[in-house]
Amino acid sequence: MKRINRLIIAVFIVTCVIFGIYTGSSYMSRDTEGPVITIKKETIEASIEDSDKTLLKGIKAEDKKDGDVSDSLIIESMQMGEDGACTVVCAAFNRSNNVSKASRTVNFTDYRPIHFNITQPLRFPAGPSNQILKYITASDCIDGDITNRVKLTQKDEEADYTGAGIFDYQIEAVNSLGDRAVLPVSVEYYTDSYEERLFHPNLYLKKYLVYISEGSTFDPKNYLDSVGIGNNLYAFDENITSEESESALPEGSELPTTTQTDKQVTGAISYDAVSYQSNVKTDKAGTYTVEYSCTTKKGYTGTTQMIVVVE
């Protein structure tokens, strides 16, 4: 009986030794190295419409055991830098699932930063700030409509932003490349009296946020749309004088079109009724403002603001 037990133990030991030798040999011979990635050009130019294949052009992956594994190359991530260049990280695999990574810089020739749009004057009855985002949208050449990513924050986190007054905010959005756009805006909260609602002019613009190219021309007058006074809406007409301003439209005349689709034009107003204060410098990239001021014949004045971004 003892002899049988010794034999079993001996067989077990021999088996363990053989298994250990086999396992050690397999471990020593296993493939632990990833492919070697070579990049012909570290920096290339491309279009945002180009495929991954184009962005990976000139990149090869070679593996010691598996040979050419360039077919395994994929784009793992893309990140836009502050300088406008995009870092593209690619990865390659071999049959043992070892991974190697490398990166190249891509300058997208037709890339356009995120653009915001403001659909009405940022002037609201005193109350919560969440009403502001209803009138702000954002679009991007990579992701399309990214309005759902727009965030609104107070410029001065410690200030009291309640009650009537003009307060500074910033709106921001980030696209899938990590590119972040920030735009400062001023928002007016008011508590108008009956007299102000009845007689003060509401100055409407065709746009409240404009993007223009550096070096282009800019005329604030081109963005005037109409003026609302009480229940009347006046369209701008360059053919009338200051004396004829705020006059009713002649019977049978063609009604001008305005951005105020929910109101009907009842008369015309002269461009002379509006003055401008602008700090726009078209030869220098930056964010600027134009303040429009409209004074009626009765002496009431209303203002509105347009943001101009020179790119």
Image: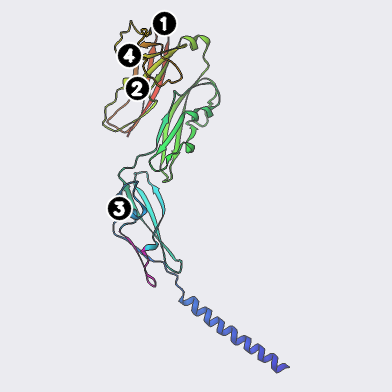
The label nearer to you, 2 versus 3, is 2
Residue annotated with mark 1:
298
User: Is residue 64 magenta-colored?
Assistant: yes
Badge 1 vs badge 3, beta-carbon distance below 8 Å: no
The label nearer to you, 2 versus 1, is 2
Q: Quadrant of the C terminus?
A: top left
Say what secondary structure mark 1 lies in: loop
The label nearer to you, 1 versus 4, is 4
Mark 2 / mark 1, whichever is N-terminal: 2
Mark 1 / mark 3, whichever is N-terminal: 3
Magenta residues, start to end: 58-70
- Say what amino acid the circle numbered 3 marks: Thr
Badge 3 vs badge 4, beta-carbon distance below 8 Å: no
Q: CA distance from mark 1 to mark 4?
A: 19 Å
- Say what amino acid the circle numbered 4 marks: Asp
Furthest-front residue in this view = 252
- Where 13 sits versus 126, above or below? below
